[in-house]
Image (cartoon, rainbow, N blue to C red):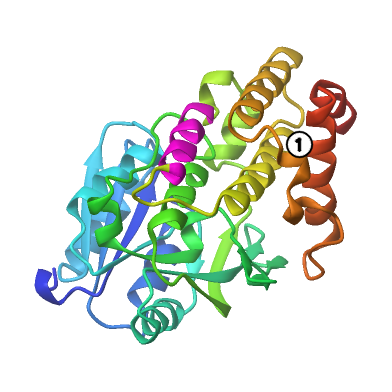
Amino acid sequence: MENKETIRVSVIVPVYNAERYLRRCLDSILQQSLEKIEILAVDDGSKDHSADILKEYEKNYPDKIHAIYQENQGQSAARNHALAMASGEFVAFVDSDDYIGQDFLKKMYDTAIEQKSDMVMCNYTKVTEQGEIIQKYEINYQEKGIRIPSYLCCNRLVRRQLFDTWKIRFREGVICEDIPLILKLEAVAANIQTIEDGEYYYRANPQSTTSTIKNRKLEMWQLPFGELRDAIAFCTDKEHPMDPLKLEFFISRIMTSLLFDTGRGCRKEVKDGMCREVQEIMETCFPRCYKNLYIKVGYFHQLPAVQKIGPWIFVCALRVHGLKLLAKLVG
């Protein structure tokens, strides 16, 4: 491994049954133009040949790759395990079925250093299993002094000190674990930057964690409502308060996505439970969210129509206790 004092970026790769994609993922990180990086790849009890591939790469690149092996505990546990061992100035996350362009880390790192930024985000591209482009996602929406974040952890570079200083970790045992973690980072990161020409390639993998859980019938305990409550409390704490209107706006967008994207196709009892949780959280923490200026349909012009209309419909349904009916209509 590189001298720990010189590591610029620790790249964390959680691995589970990824033998089909793992070589391309690791090769894309090894080919980075940015020097002085380390790769922490955590095998989460894979049942295929992923562990053998990691052993091969660690043997061939002992100065770059450190493989970690654990019993199956989930993607969040794997990431947390690697975070505890990371030594880089910054941390990046790359899922084992994804890959990155050659200058991905350099562009992000150079921006962070030049702008004295704690967190840098970039656009990302969704691709098929074969690597064909499905859609390019632009996350650099900044209008009227408001930067609208995405909640994917893999399209960003984060100063490692933030995780340790504020004891921020992924919630284990739930899906959508990125969301509350990113919300906390948004509250404490200084001078957050975005770049347009990101080179993160997110693979549409039917065997991914989220897809697999959805196909197995989602249960309430797998949803991150408890961690979201904790994140809201974190973001309203006097040590690192987020602007109340921004937080209310962000949470409204998150709840809209959880109900009508993650919750789509769920069993009725699960969907009803989601509606109850969301209603309670919003009424307790944001009772006047329907008056939020940022949620009004005509406030932002750059956002795609669905991202402007969705939260507005959500708060309207919330106000009249119509979430269950709206969720039923969405499917």
Q: Secondary structure at mark 1?
A: helix
46 vs 183, left or right, is: left
263 vs 296, left or right, is: left
Give the image quarter of residue 187: bottom left
| 69 up-or-down from 34: above or below | above
Give the image quarter of residue 279: top right
| 17 up-or-down from 265: above or below | below
Residue 79 vs residue 281, the one in the foreground: 281
Give the image quarter of residue 243: bottom right
187 vs 314, left or right, is: left
Residue where numbered disc 1 is placed = 260
Q: Residue furthest top?
A: 269
- The residue that appears at 10% across and 73% down in the rendered structure is 5
| 99 up-or-down from 184: above or below | below
- Tell me the chief SS of the magenta region: helix
- The residue that appears at 26% across and 83% down in the rendered structure is 35
Residue 32 vs residue 313, the one in the foreground: 313
Q: Amino acid at mark 1?
A: Phe
44 vs 325, left or right, is: left
| Res 96 seen here | no
- Label 1 crowding class (10 Å Cα cut-off): few <14, some 14-19, many 20+? some
- Coordinates of residue 312 in the picture (x, y in percent): 82, 45
- Coordinates of residue 184 in the picture (x, y in percent): 43, 49
- The residue that appears at 20% across and 68% down in the rendered structure is 60
Q: How many marks?
A: 1
Q: What quarter of the picture does the N terminus occupy?
A: bottom left
| Res 83 seen here | yes
- Coordinates of residue 50 in the picture (x, y in percent): 36, 48
Residue 103 vs residue 55, the one in the foreground: 103
Q: Which residues are magenta?
A: 225-236
